[in-house]
Image (spheres, rainbow, N blue to C red):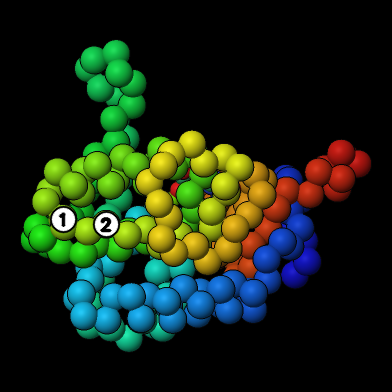
Amino acid sequence: MSKVVIHGHTFKIKISAAEIHKAVSDVARQINIDLKDKKPLFLAVLNGSFMFASDLMKKVNVECEISFMKLASYEGTSSTGTIKQLIGINEDIKGRTVVIIEDIVDTGNTIENIAEQLKELGVSEIKIATLLFKPEAYTKTIPIEYTAIVVPNDFLVGYGLDYNGLGRNLADIYVLDYVADEKK
Ligand code: 5GP
Ligand code: MG
């Protein structure tokens, strides 16, 4: 499929499934070297990272655990704006090496927020593995240890990433096709 229509907008293919799988294999290979004796806990951030997490973990061969978490967003009572709280962590993560698995790092707000909360829970080492990274949008200093694919500042859909709830099931990654949309 070179084009898909989601919520009336046309998206064209940007990164093929084959390209994704090669990049995921490269990340797994590096993790297998770096984390060999660390017994890491992989924490996949739902919903977007489910496909990346699944494909990545099939290629990771170090002794490890995997768990899943979500961010609950709610408005705080103070004027500090939206607070995001981690939910779903039942493991004792004190003193562990934790690898956060993300679908995409954009501004870095999400990843920074997660890292701060994990530090408060006493993890000894935090690493980030992301499928996609947008360096042009990134505003933080926290290092992104494992990036599968670096992308420009475009809106992407597929392979876990959604557009208003749709498109997560696509095997390839798509970008909004402005030309096709303007013709309407
Ligand atoms: P950040 O907190 O790094 O700015 O953004 C992280 C979140 O924004 C991602 O987990 C994802 O939900 C959303 N996001 C950022 N860029 C994209 C994109 O290109 N496509 C989709 N579908 N979501 C995105
Ligand atoms: Mg995400």
60 shown above or below 183: below
Which residue is at a point 37% across and 75% down the rendered structure image? 31
181 shown above or below 44: above
Is there any visible trace of residue 109 in the rendered image? yes
Dot 1: few (<14), some (14–19), or many (≥20) neighbours within 10 Å? some
**Quadrant housing residue 112:** top left
- In the figure, is residue 161 to the left or right of 84? right
Along the viewing direction, whichever of 154 and 129 lies nearer the viewer: 129
**Quadrant housing residue 95:** bottom left
Q: From mark 1 to mark 2, how far is it between C-alphas?
A: 7 Å
Instruction: Return the mark for residue 126.
Output: 2
**Type of residue at label 1?**
Val
Along the viewing direction, whichever of 11 and 108 lies nearer the viewer: 108
* Numbered disc 2: secondary structure: strand
- In the figure, is residue 42 to the left or right of 91? right
Which residue is at a point 30% across and 50% down the rendered structure image? 70
| Quadrant of image for the C terminus | top right
Could you tell me if the residues under marks 1 and 2 are in contact, i.e. CB atoms within 8 Å?
A: yes
| Quadrant of image for the N terminus | bottom right
Which residue is at a point 30% across and 18% down the rendered structure image? 80
Rendering coords of residue 128 (x, y %)? 37, 58
